[in-house]
Amino acid sequence: MCRLVAPNHLRWILALALPLAAALATLPARAANDAPVATTMRIGEAAPTLHAEEYRVLSAVLRHGLPADTRRLVIEAATVCDHETLTRLEQDPAAVGKLELTPELVTDFAVMNATPVVIERRFDIAADYTLLDRRELDTLFAKDGWPGFFSKYIATPGVLRLSRVGFDPAIRHALVMVEQLCGSECGAGRLVRLERGDDESWRVLDATIVWLATRADTTARNEP
């Protein structure tokens, strides 16, 4: 099947393409010399709202992928992670192996994304951003489609969709899915793995493509 990607629209998500990092030791529990992280999260339990640490991870992903001249973003106002991706992570060892994910990290990611939650304006990024809920997106696309979207939200890379964040028990590694929808034959989704440094900041280690826009799935994938 021919896979079509529009480079000009996909600079953001393709910027996440990094060489795979060297293998990391599994961290089943916090080591004595781990830097503390202020959190009340319970790994394996999904709170009804995004935790502050999730916003730190998502902000790091957005900052990492944004071109320097990005001034405006549109982000769907609820977390998204489709059942197909969750099933692939849980059942396909090869997909997990590409990102060197621990079973605990995969399990927490699945638990966290069982139910969508509302995204609030708590991102630490330089670009301005608009949060649009499902009703607003459906109304906009039913009326004007992508031409209407880009005439209203000029100079944006399309619609970004973010999953909830999965963590390992030590809260040293994180997993998130980021989707960019940008046209009838333009879009991509990636799983991104991050690591928390001793300075408490999160950095992207590597990423793998989950899907790319194709002629066959433009209706299912490429409109919010």
Image (spheres, rainbow, N blue to C red):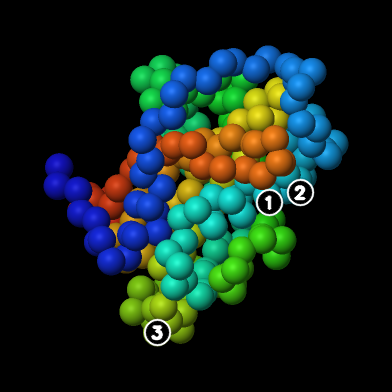
Q: Say which quarter of the image contains residue 33.
A: top right
Task: Please report contact status of discs 1 and 2: CB closer than 8 Å, yes or no.
Answer: yes
The nearer-to-camera label among 1 and 3 is: 1
Q: Is residue 33 visible?
A: yes
Q: Is residue 193 above or below residue 2?
A: above
Residue depicted at 20% across the width and 54% down the height: 4
Q: Is residue 71 above or below residue 64?
A: below
Secondary structure at numbered mark 3: helix
Disc on res. 20: none
Q: Which residue is mark 1?
A: 55
Residue 156 position in % (x across, y down): 44, 73
Q: Which residue is mark 2?
A: 52
Amino acid type at mark 1? Tyr
Amino acid type at mark 3? Ser
Amino acid type at mark 2? Ala
Q: Which residue is mark 3?
A: 151
